[in-house]
Image (spheres, rainbow, N blue to C red):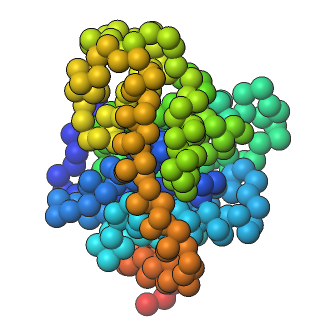
Amino acid sequence: MSEAGATPTSFTPRVFSGIQPSGGLTLGNYLGAIKRFVDMQGPEFETIYCMVDLHAITVWQDPEALTRNTRELCAGFIAAGIDPTQSILFNQSQVPEHAQLGWLFSCVARMGWMGRMTQWKDKTAGKNAEAASLGLFAYPALMAADILVYHATHVPVGEDQKQHLELTRDIAAKFNHDYGVDFFPLTEPVIEGAATRVMSLRDGSKKMSKSDPSDMSRINMTDDADAIAKKIRKAKTDPEPLPETLDGLKERPEARNLVNIYAALADQSAEQVISDHAGQQFGQFKPALVDLAVDRLAPISTEMARLMNDPAEIDRILGAGAARAREITAPILRKTYDIVGMVPPPA
Ligand code: AQP
């Protein structure tokens, strides 16, 4: 539960989250996001999952690669357990209300709020910020629209998105205040589990990321068993054995990362993993992690490859998902325009 307040009770419990098709899916995206999306699928929530292609183009994307990555991401969602007949699964650009509400929110959000976003600062650090796209600066306003155009109440994300979720709440609160309404919910971020921040296999201070230039820094969801084994075997560690308690990993980020990955893949707590493997050297722990990772990830990558053989079926799923999404977004956008005072088309 965030500090800012309780979940509104007057809104349908609805989960929204998205992933950028800006490269291949990583283990970080899987453990920090998709695996948890699957866990939230069920009677408690309506679940809506999106390939946020409009966000991906805030940095250059080769058009052919963008198309392939969007389809592959869709295949990844389904292979990991998202059922497209239960959850709504689609790509953002097919639902124009995201961009339309995004424009309204870029008029609600303040320049100062955007300039304080650490992801903006990180992505432009050491580079010429003047040369970054306007979209990269403004994208948290579009992200707020992605969420609020569904009146979503819960958003499962990794730790890196926490600040953007706080901004989403600020935008909803300012809109509600400015127009004297209680229209947009103050959405709850859901940041839970052992792997809300999976780190690079080469540097325990950096997030595992699709756009890291080093392929050895990440496990891709399309990696085969040999590649997974090689990357884990070569993952940076230290010469100490695993300690008796988690406290003993405080100053050992790479070791902590491998323990967290093990815990998330095994559906255990990090404490449990430490108590089961205390005293082991990495020469013993890494092969156990390889076995677990291959066991959990290989069926997903095999299924992704099978689904990718039929791109027309993936496109059909995305189109059907977008049509279902618009049944929710169109009335919410219409009502928002009405609140703002836009003259509607004649009845
Ligand atoms: N390393 C990670 N650990 C835990 N969660 C992660 N997520 C991403 N990386 C990790 C979560 O995955 C969801 C989708 O993220 P995204 O692809 O839309 O954007 P991102 O966070 O910028 O991911 P990348 O891999 O770092 O992409 P690039 O390299 O294109 O910027 C989010 O819920 C995110 O928290």
The residue nearer to you, when weighing 295 against 187, is 295
Look at 43% across and 48% down and name the residue there: 294
Q: Quadrant of residue 84?
A: bottom left
Q: Is residue 265 above or below residue 41?
A: above
Tell me if I can see residue 37 in this picture.
yes
Residue at 35% x, 65% y: name it: 82
**Which of the pair 122/116 is nearer the observer?**
122
Q: Position of residue 47 (x, y in %)?
A: 31, 63
Q: Position of residue 96 (x, y in %)?
A: 55, 72
The quadrant holding residue 189 is top left
**25 lies left or right of 49:** right
Residue in the image at 40% along x and 73% along y = 325
Closest to the observer: 23 or 308? Answer: 308
Which residue lies at the image location 57% right of the left edge and 37% below the top edge?
231
Q: Nearer the viewer, residue 122 or 134?
A: 122
Q: Is residue 315 left or right of residue 276?
A: right
Q: Please state, as top left, top right, bottom left or bottom right, where the C terminus lies in the image.
A: bottom left
**Can residue 179 be seen by looking at this rendering?**
no
Name above or below for residue 132 compared with residue 83: above
Residue 66 at x, y percent in the picture? 67, 64
Q: Which quadrant of the rendered structure holds the N terminus?
A: top left
Q: Is residue 121 left or right of residue 180?
A: right
